[in-house]
Image (cartoon, rainbow, N blue to C red):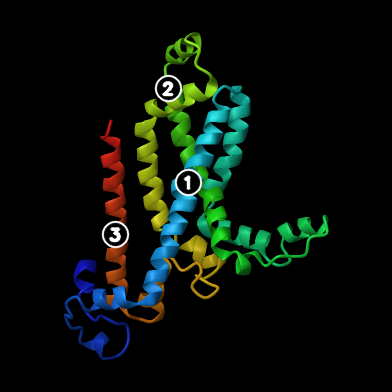
């Protein structure tokens, strides 16, 4: 039905609400001529690369790697602390971080102790703020994936590399990363798809603003479909989002099959 609606002028108000017409590719032509759509695509790419492809992957792997040789009680404590952010609903995470980053929030109070003037983080650095919050919220999933993959590396392989004189960096680059490559790509696919669909976190923190600085494709799609009541246009945007997700997934899988 979504596929069909994207080729119609379906609306929640007006004549189109009573008599929906097939309009062919008009919604897609309008979309690719819309400067706001181009802005939302750029914001989505930046948000995706910074918070998912780089942020969550690196933070999740580093935490898992640093905890690998630690005692079990220590790993459990750190794991619980990090998982607390992941299992917290997005709307709760958004309100917590709004309170932390607001003009009179905890962060500015802490900066006041060292005589730094309050900063309107969500106004001056809105995209950076939502990227950081999404990394904080989602890094635990990557940590779990990498932790399981690292625990499956045979100890005799690492011991043999030490005997052969490999240093820590060489063991990481030539032993660890190639062995967990499959888990890394799988995690990349899952994190990418989850990040592409992030809506509540951004909408509750910034509403897509100020202006269009944090308007990603899900926010833009929602505004067109349920704020401007243009359901046909909104569903066309959703198809583009779906195509992006499928394309990235196929790209990752192709990379996984490459020696």
Please name the residue shown 55% across and 73% down the image: 210
How packed mark 1 is, by other alpha carbons closer than 10 Å (few <14, some 14-19, many 20 or more), is some
Q: Label 1, label 3: how many angstroms apart (C-alpha)?
A: 21 Å
How packed mark 3 is, by other alpha carbons closer than 10 Å (few <14, some 14-19, many 20 or more), is some
> Label 2: which residue?
175
Query: Who comes first in sequence, dot 3 or dot 2?
Result: 2
Q: SS for tag 1?
A: helix
Above or below residue 31? Residue 240 is above
User: Viewed as shown, does residue 54 lie left or right of 187?
Assistant: right
Residue 54: mark: 1
Point out the image quarter for the C terminus.
top left
Residue 169 placement (x, y as % from top left): 52, 25
Above or below residue 40? Residue 129 is above
Query: Who comes first in sequence, dot 1 or dot 2?
Result: 1
Residue 19 placement (x, y as % from top left): 20, 87
> Label 3: which residue?
242
Answer with the quarter of the image where residue 217 lies: bottom left
């Amino acid at each position: 039905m979504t596929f069909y609606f994207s080729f119609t002028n379906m609306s929640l108000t007006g004549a189109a609400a009573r008599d929906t017409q097939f309009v062919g590719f008009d919604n897609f032509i309008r979309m690719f001529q819309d400067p706001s759509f181009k802005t939302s695509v750029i914001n989505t790419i930046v948000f995706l690369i910074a918070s998912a492809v780089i942020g969550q992957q690196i933070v999740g792997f580093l935490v898992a790697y640093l905890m690998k040789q630690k005692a079990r009680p220590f790993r459990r404590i750190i794991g619980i602390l990090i998982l607390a952010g992941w299992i917290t609903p997005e709307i709760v995470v958004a309100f917590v971080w709004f309170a932390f980053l607001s003009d009179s929030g905890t962060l500015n109070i802490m900066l006041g102790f060292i005589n730094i003037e309050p900063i309107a983080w969500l106004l001056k650095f809105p995209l950076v703020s939502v990227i950081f919050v999404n990394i904080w919220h989602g890094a635990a999933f990557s940590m779990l994936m990498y932790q399981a993959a690292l625990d499956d590396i045979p100890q005799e392989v690492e011991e043999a590399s030490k005997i052969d004189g490999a240093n820590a960096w060489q063991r990481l680059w030539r032993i660890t990363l190639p062995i967990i490559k499959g888990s890394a790509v799988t995690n990349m696919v899952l994190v990418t798809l989850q990040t592409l669909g992030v809506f509540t976190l951004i909408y509750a923190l910034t509403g897509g603003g100020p202006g269009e600085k944090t308007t990603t494709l899900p926010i833009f799609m929602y505004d067109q479909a349920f704020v401007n009541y243009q359901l046909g246009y909104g569903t066309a945007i959703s198809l583009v989002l779906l195509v992006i997700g499928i394309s990235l997934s196929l790209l990752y899988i192709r990379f996984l099959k490459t020696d």
